[in-house]
Image (cartoon, rainbow, N blue to C red):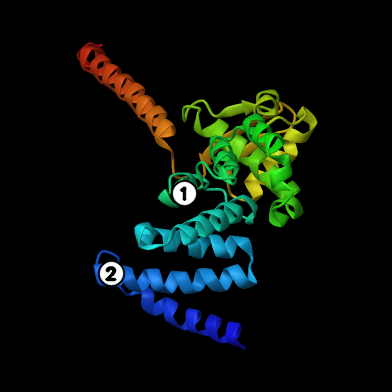
Amino acid sequence: EALEATKSAIDKNRSVLAELADTESEAAVVHSAFYETAMTYRKAVGPPEAYYREAIQYVAYTSLSDLSEEARYSLATDLSLAALTGEGVFNFGEVVTAQALQCLEGTDLSYLGELLSAGARGDVLGFQRVADAHAAAIQLQPSLVSRAEAVKEKITLLALVNMIFERPSLERTLSFEDISDRVAVPVDQVEWVIMRALSLKLIKGTMDQVEQTVDVTWVMPRVLDNKQMAELASRFGEWAVKVSKTHEYMLEHTGALLNQ
């Protein structure tokens, strides 16, 4: 009954919360209290993806310095596990860049941060190296053990997403062979990986089974870490140079073309 009453209160007040301005300090306190309640409820009843949605909002509205060391450690642990195991949670960058995760550094659960970082980069082999190195510790986490296959699938899909993101927008026709190398699955399983990514709306595009290619027109937006931001900035710089050269070419040749 207590849990049902809590759920009812959360559902009733969520619409009220949406009317508060995020920028007001008083509103931030209300947001923090609301998401703490919702997060605690979801930790008790699940599922992990629902807990994740509430917890990531709680972190956004809460000053972690106000929490005890034990509370920060517990929050970072639960948030990491929810991100790894939660269905439909693919934006690992939200967690990797969150200050909350830093309190796991140097602890026996620091491997959770390493797993998330490898996943955010789409580094399948790096993720596996961390998992192998901490296999005994991972066995002590029931959620990671019970959802091991789902986690493996998620990292495979994130590898595909990162592969596409790293390509210039005009060079996003990928061969099955290249995808196979990047996501570490046999070529005959690549079609399934692409179809899974399309069905989950991680990417949009068309697949050519005969040519064994996929033409991607859109990829899931996500939070980037500092390295990924630097790479994106570099690509913007290259794009700006191309635009400038095209502009100069048009200015130089417009007169000649009009006089023909």
Specify the amino acid type for callout 2: Ala
Specify the amino acid type for callout 1: Cys
Q: CA distance from mark 2 to mark 1?
A: 30 Å
Q: Is residue 221 left or right of residue 3?
A: left
- Near mark 1 (Cα within 10 A), the count class, few <14, some 14-19 or many ≥20, is some
Q: Quadrant of residue 157?
A: top right
Question: How far across and how far down the image is residue 232, in percent?
Answer: 40, 31
**Which residue lies at the image location 42% right of the left edge and 74% below the top edge?**
34
* Above or below, 155 relative to 227: below
Q: Quadrant of residue 28?
A: bottom left
**Which residue lies at the image location 51% right of the left edge and 54% below the top edge?**
76
Q: Quadrant of residue 240?
A: top left
First along the sequence among labels 2 and 1: 2
Question: How far across and how far down the image is residue 165, in percent?
Answer: 50, 34
Q: Secondary structure at mark 1?
A: helix
* Disc ID at residue 159: none
Judging by the rendered image, the residue that carries numbered circle 2 is 21
Residue situated in front as seen by the camera: 172 or 108: 108
**Which residue lies at the image location 71% right of the left edge and 29% below the top edge?**
184
Report the quarter where the C terminus lies: top left
Residue furthest right in the image: 188
- Near mark 2 (Cα within 10 A), the count class, few <14, some 14-19 or many ≥20, is few
Judging by the rendered image, the residue that carries numbered circle 1 is 103
Report the quarter where the N terminus lies: bottom right
Question: How far across and how far down the image is residue 216, in percent?
Answer: 56, 36
Question: How far across and how far down the image is residue 218, in percent?
Answer: 51, 41
Residue situated in front as seen by the camera: 116 or 87: 116
Q: Secondary structure at mark 2?
A: loop
**Which residue lies at the image location 72% right of the left edge and 40% below the top edge?**
135
